Image (cartoon, grey):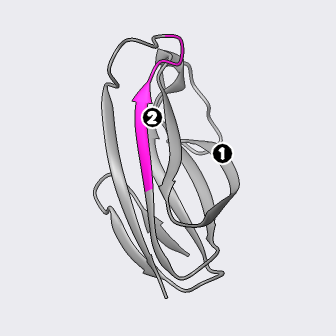
Amino acid sequence: MKRLSEKFNAIAVKKGELFMLDLDGNASTGYMWDVKITAGDATVISRETIPTNPGKMVIGGGAVERTIFRAENDGEIEIEAKWQRPWEKSTPPAKQAVFKVSVK
């Protein structure tokens, strides 16, 4: 399965293929990734948080927030991710990124 991350923000997949977006995070700080499909046609299949140290979810410990998508149609998919505290509506995100997926 092809993988997007903050360091690798563009991939090409086939129609119907699954791909993942892995973003480093730390939910114990209150920050969470808000991930949205802003263009194109993809379906979110699953979302999970994976501890950086497998088997040990530790307060203050890092984790990866993984979202798995399915590319539904040919074209371009754009995904926007914002790292923010959900209750701080007027505060700009601490981080944000845009990801591109070419579907053929």
Q: CA distance from mark 2 to mark 1?
A: 12 Å
Q: Secondary structure at mark 1?
A: strand
Mark closer to the chain start, 2 or 1: 2
Comparing 78 with 68, the one in front is: 78
Comparing 64 with 42, the one in front is: 42
* Residue 19 highlighted magenta (yes or no): no
**Residue at which label 1 appears:** 48
Q: Is residue 37 above or below residue 50?
A: below
Q: Name the residue located 32 percent from the left edge and 20 percent from the top edge.
A: 92
Residue, far right: 45
Q: Residues within 10 Å of mark 1 (few under 14, many from 20)?
A: few
Q: Is residue 58 above or below residue 70?
A: above
Q: Main secondary structure of the magenta part?
A: strand
Q: Name the residue located 41 percent from the left edge and 35 percent from the top edge.
A: 82
- Give the number of the disc on residue 25: 2
Q: Is residue 86 above or below residue 26?
A: above
Q: Name the residue located 61 percent from the left edge and 65 percent from the top edge.
A: 42
Counting from the top left corner in percent of width and height, residue 95 is at 31, 33
Counting from the top left corner in percent of width and height, residue 35 is at 51, 43
Residue span colored magenta: 79-87
Q: Contact (CB < 8 A) between labels 2 and 1?
A: no
Which quadrant would residue 99 be assigned to in this image? bottom left
Q: Secondary structure at mark 2?
A: strand
Amino acid type, label 1: Glu
Q: Residues within 10 Å of mark 2 (few under 14, many from 20)?
A: many
Quadrant of the image containing the N terminus: bottom right
Counting from the top left corner in percent of width and height, residue 89 is at 46, 13
Amino acid type, label 2: Gly
Counting from the top left corner in percent of width and height, residue 63 is at 51, 38
Comparing 81 with 7, the one in front is: 81
